[in-house]
Image (cartoon, grey):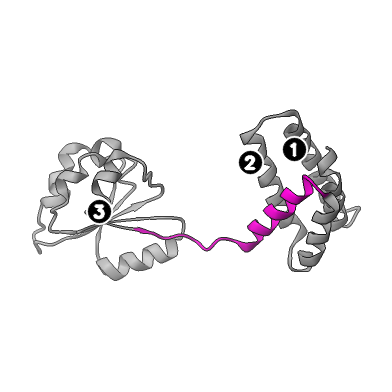
Amino acid sequence: MIRIFYGDDRVKANAKIKELLGENYEIIDGEPLILNDLPNIFLGASLLSTTRNILIRDFTANKLVYEELKNYLNTPHNIILLESKLDTRTTTFKDIKDKVEVVKFALPEDPNFRLVYDIYATAKRDGKKAVAMLNKTKQNEAPNMFFGLIASQAIKDFKLNQGTKEKRVLKELSKLDLDMKSAKVEPWLLIESFLLRLSSI
């Protein structure tokens, strides 16, 4: 049987791998494989057993061998493909997704990320309202972490639309970063000041 595991929660993925394959299993790196390796991996027996437990890392990154996976779905072995990234839009994936077990191991979404996104989006229209939102929650936040999430949102905005305003926002954030590191003013006051100015930057 072939299973495909992907996602960013490697702790849960590794626990499931050990549950399914046991403690002793073969580990193969998928990227350097060539087509001639596939019959031995998927169909070849070992000296001790006709059924093998195999973990293949980043198999789908090797497009040439990945496209041949459909020819080995009848493998007698227990095989898990552990992927750093999995493109579910490819023809190969669409061809096999109903014939293999696909499991995503995703880390839970950080609630702070959503909160910061909402505050930042609000500040682009209404700085006072954004500061009011921040004041309700900042006792549970660290200002430097909050700043980092704001910066990540501004960078996303810049990647989507590299306009004059997006550039000015990034410049303001770089100044804010320097001001926060100098520690002459309380960090939250600096962040609040930035939020109040954001709509007019």
Residue pointed to by mark 2: 156
Pointer 1 or 2: first along the chain:
2
Displayed quadrant of residue 39: top left
Bounds of the magenta segment: 103-126
Q: Nearer the viewer, mark 3 or mark 1?
A: 3
Among all residues in the image, which is located at the extreme right? 184
| Mark before the other along the chain sequence, 3 or 1 | 3
Residue 98: mark: 3
Badge 3 marks a residue whose secondary structure is loop
Give x and y (percent) for residue 90: 33, 40
Left or right side of 53 for 158: right
Dividing the image into 4 quarters, which one contains the N terminus?
bottom left
Amino acid type assigned to the residue bearing label 3 in the image: Asp
What amino acid is found at the position of numbered circle 2 in the picture? Lys
Q: Residue at x 79, y 60 (%)?
A: 134
Dividing the picture into quadrants, the one containing residue 25 is bottom left
Q: Which residue is mark 1?
A: 170
Residue at the image position 77 percent from the left and 58 percent from the top: 143
Query: Left or right of 147: which side holds 17?
Result: left
> Which amino acid is tagged 1?
Leu
* Secondary structure beneath label 1: helix
Residue 140 in picture, x, y percent from top left: 74, 68
